[in-house]
Amino acid sequence: MSRTAKDTILAWNPGSSQVAIFTSPDTQGATSSFKRTGLAANTSLGQLTKDQLRAQCFIDAMVLIVRDQCDPIAVHNALVQVQEYRQALPDSLQQSIGPQQLQQLRQQAQSQNGHYTGQSQPYQQSGQDQSFVRNQTQQGQSQQERA
C-alpha cells in the first residue's frame, strides 16, 4: 500500500541528512528524536484537495532544503515514498536516488550544460551561484524600471 500525505508524518533535523517519514498518528513517539515535523503533523492537511496536497509536499521539500539546509537527496528519498509527491515527479525521479543514480543525474546535467553540485549537509552556495542570483536580481530590477 502506498503512503499518502494525510497519513504520513515527515520528520527532520535541520542542517542534516536526517529526514524520515512515519505513519500518522505517531503513538509510539518515533518522531521524538527529530526537531521538526510536517505533512500529517500539520492539522489543516486534511482539508486540502489532491492538487493542494501535491503542492504541500513540494512546499515542505523546499522548506527542508532551503530554510533548514537539509540534504536534498535525503529529502527526496523520504518524500518519494509519499503518493502525492511521487505522482508530481517526472518518471526519471519516481524512485529513491542512490549513489549510482545520483552520479548519472550529475552526468546528464553536465552534458546538458547544467550545473548540479549535489552538495549536502548543508548546501554551500558557491561564488558562481551567488553571482548568478545577483545578476538575475539586477536584471529583474532593470526590467521593472523599464515597465
Image (cartoon, grey):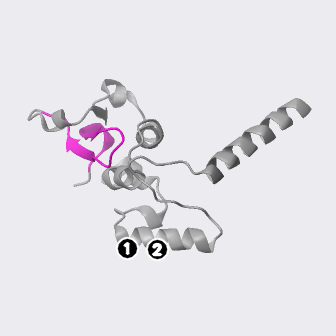
Res. 42 mark: none
Res. 100 mark: 1
Does the magenta segment cover residue 27?
no
Where residue 80 appears, x then y in whole percent?
35, 54
Looking at the rendered structure, the kind of residue marked 2 is: Gln
Q: Which residue is more in the foreground, 49 or 100?
A: 100
**Residue 69 location, quadrant:** top left
Give the left or right position of residue 109, taking residue 146 as reference: left
| Residue shown at 57% from the left, 68% from the top | 109
Residues packed near mark 1 inside 10 Å, few (<14), some (14 to 19) or many (20 plus) = few
Report if residue 25 is visible in the image: no
State yes or no: discs 2 and 1 in contact (Cβ < 8 Å): yes
Give the left or right position of residue 65, taking residue 3 as reference: right
Give the left or right position of residue 73, taking residue 144 as reference: left
Magenta stretch, residue numbers: 3-26
Q: Which residue is mark 2?
A: 104
Q: List the single residue furthest toward the left.
A: 28
Where residue 132 appears, x then y in whole percent?
69, 49
Where residue 135 appears, x then y in whole percent?
75, 45
| Residue shown at 37% from the left, 73% from the top | 100
Looking at the rendered structure, the kind of residue marked 1 is: Gln
What element does badge 1 sit on? helix
Report if residue 1 is visible in the image: yes
What element does badge 2 sit on? helix
142 in relation to 81, above or below = above
Does the magenta segment cover residue 7?
yes
| Residue shown at 12% from the left, 33% from the top | 29
Where residue 27 appears, x then y in whole percent?
10, 32
Q: How many marks?
A: 2
